[in-house]
Image: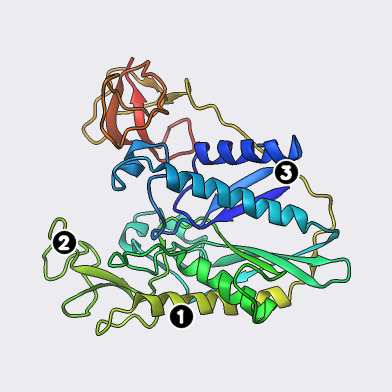
Amino acid sequence: MCLAEHFKCKVSTKTSSKAVKALKGIYGNLYSEKNVCISSTHTHAGPGGFLQYALYIVTSQGFIRQTFDSIIEGIVKSVKMAHQNMQPGYIFWNEGDLYNASINRSPTSYLNNPPEERENYKTDVDTNMLLLKFTDLNRKPIGMINWFAVHCTSMNNTNKLISSDNKGYASVLFEQKMNGKVPIGKGPFVAAFAQANEGDVSPNTKGARCIDTGLPCDVNTSTCNGQSRVGISIVINAGPLLTFINRNSYSSEAKWSYRRSSVGVVYFTTSKWACQPLHQVAEYVKRLGIVLSMNVRQGIDFKNSGREICPSVIKLKRNDHRPWITKDYPPLRRTVVKHVVNLPDNATLPVKRLDFICTS
C-alpha cells in the first residue's frame, strides 16, 4: 500500500495514471491503481499547467509538459525511496482537536445551513486531526501521517514564488525535530501533513482585512468601505504574525506551521495500536447516465423533469489552436448547458452542485 502526498494544488486522473504506469514499469503489478493513493495538499502557491482540464490551466497559458513531467518524476522517486526503506513495523493512531489554527472563510454563508445541522458541531470548522504513527519492530519512530482540514493559503496573493505553504513547512519543522541537523528530505524519519476536508477552512485566523486600514472587511460583502474593484485586490487575508506594516506572509506561514508542528505532541502520546491487517479500497463511480430529478430553480427552466450527467467537456473545433486547450478531451457527444446548477433537495445524488447537465 502506498500513499504519495505531493505539494501541489490538485491531483488529476492524468497525474495518477501516469505515475502508476511509471511504477508498474519498475515494480510490475506490485503497485497499481488498487493500492496507490496520490493526494495533494492543495497549496495555492504551487506551479501551474499540469492538469488536463482547460479551466485550471488558463492562468498558466496552457499545459506545461516540464511541470507535469517533474511532478511524475518526483512522485516516482519518492515511492522508490520509500520502497527501498520498507521494513516490518507497527502502526499506531491518535486523534485530537486543533484549535486556533483555522477559521471559516465564509462564516455568514455557513449560517445559512439549517440550525439542526449546525447544532451537531462545536464550531463552524472541523478541528479534528487524525494521526498515524509508524515505528519499527523496536518501537523506534520512523514516520507519521496526519490529516487536518485547512487551506494551504498562508502565502497571500502577493507571493510570486512556488511554496509548499503551511503544510510543507510544518513537515520540514517536524522532520527537523525528529531527524536532527540533516539536509531536508535526507533523514530517516518522514512526516506528511496531508489534506482533509478543507472546504471553506482558512489558516488566516485574523480574517480578511482591508489593506489601507488594516481593519476587518465587511463580512457580508467582503468589501472595504463599500468598494470592490474588479481585478484589484483591496482585501488581504491575515494570519499569525502577518502585520500590515511589512505584510510578511512568510512569517504568517512559519507561525501557523509551528502551531501545526507543535501539535505533534499528539504524535508522542499516540498509543492506540492498529492491530488489524491492512486493507485498501479503490472505488470508481460511474456518473455518466445517472438521471437527476430536477425542479425549476434559479430561473433555469428544464422542460423535462429528468436530466442525466454527461462529460464535462468543451465543444471545440478540430483546428482550434488555443494554447490552453490540451488534446486529452474526448469527443463531445451531447449538448451541454454551461451553467452551474444548484440541485434541488430531492436530487438523487448526494451532491450539491453540478457543472454540466445534458440536454439531449
Q: Which residue is mark 3?
A: 280
- Foreground label between 2 and 3: 2
Q: Which residue is mark 2?
A: 232
Relative depth, front residue between 261 and 276: 261
Residue type indicated by callout 2: Ile
**Colouring scheme applied when the structure was drawn:** rainbow
**Quarter that holds the C terminus:** top left
Find residue 115 and report its horizontal and vertical position in percent: 42, 57
Q: Disc 1 on helix, strand or loop?
A: helix
First in sequence: mark 1 vs mark 2 = 2
Residue type indicated by callout 3: Gln
The residue that appears at 48% across and 33% down in the rendered structure is: 349
First in sequence: mark 2 vs mark 3 = 2
Find residue 27 and report its horizontal and vertical position in percent: 74, 40
Residue type indicated by callout 1: Lys
Find residue 65 and report its horizontal and vertical position in percent: 43, 41
> Dividing the picture into quarters, in which one does residue 134 lie?
bottom right
Is residue 160 visible in the rendered image? The answer is yes
Find residue 155 and report its horizontal and vertical position in percent: 37, 68
Residue 331 higher or lower than 121, as above or below: above
The Cα atoms of the two marked residues, 2 and 3, are separated by: 47 Å
Q: Disc 3 on helix, strand or loop?
A: loop
Q: Is residue 11 left or right of residue 79?
A: left
The residue that appears at 39% across and 74% down in the rendered structure is: 205
Q: Which residue is mark 1?
A: 255
The residue that appears at 40% across and 80% down in the rendered structure is: 251
Relative depth, front residue between 118 and 183: 183
Q: Is residue 246 left or right of residue 333?
A: left
Q: From this viewpoint, which residue is outermost toward the right?
A: 138
Q: Residue 128, labelled with which disc?
A: none
